[in-house]
Amino acid sequence: MQDFFDMGGYAGFVWPSYGVAAIVLGLVFASTWRLLKSSEQRLAQLQAARGRRPRRDRGASAGAEAPMAPAPGDISDAPAGTPAGAAGETR
């Protein structure tokens, strides 16, 4: 067992490198966790300001599709009195 901890004479390099890697991974995890929580809070604020309900669980709306918005050049976007082919319509 002592041979394992000696690491073939390189224990002075191996164990500190494991420690530094563990610290860096811990900092990355903590940073990501804080970013996630602040992003969720910001999203909730934006949704509340916009008057929308929070997202439902993905499993509850798996079969529902969002309605499609009209294309930018659709005739319904044309001002009143615009002839039918002048609204950006291509054939």
Image: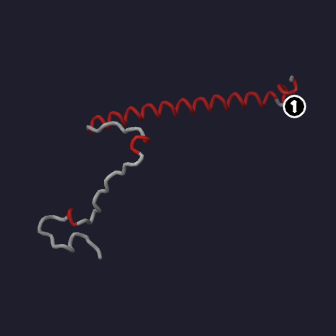
Q: Position of residue 13 (x, y in %)?
A: 78, 31
Lateral position of residue 77 relative to residue 47, left or right? left
Residue located farthest toward the bottom when viewing the structure as drawn? 91
Q: Amino acid at mark 1?
A: Gly
At a point 40% along the width and 48% down the height, the residue shown is 63
Lateral position of residue 29 relative to residue 62, left or right? right
Q: Quadrant of residue 10?
A: top right
At a point 85% along the width and 26% down the height, the residue shown is 6
Q: Quadrant of residue 20?
A: top right
| Relative vertical location of residue 75 with respect to residue 9 in this rendering, above or below | below
Q: Position of residue 30 (x, y in %)?
A: 54, 29
Read off the residue under disc 1.
8
Mark 1, Cα crowd under 10 Å, few <14 / some 14-19 / many 20+, is few
Nearest to the observer: residue 27 or residue 76:
76
Q: Quadrant of the N terminus?
A: top right
Q: Quadrant of the C terminus?
A: bottom left
Q: Position of residue 51 (x, y in %)?
A: 26, 37
At a point 37% along the width and 39% down the height, the residue shown is 55
At a point 27% along the width and 36% down the height, the residue shown is 49
| Relative vertical location of residue 89 with respect to residue 71 in this rendering, above or below | below
Nearest to the observer: residue 63 or residue 28:
63
Lateral position of residue 90 relative to residue 31, left or right? left
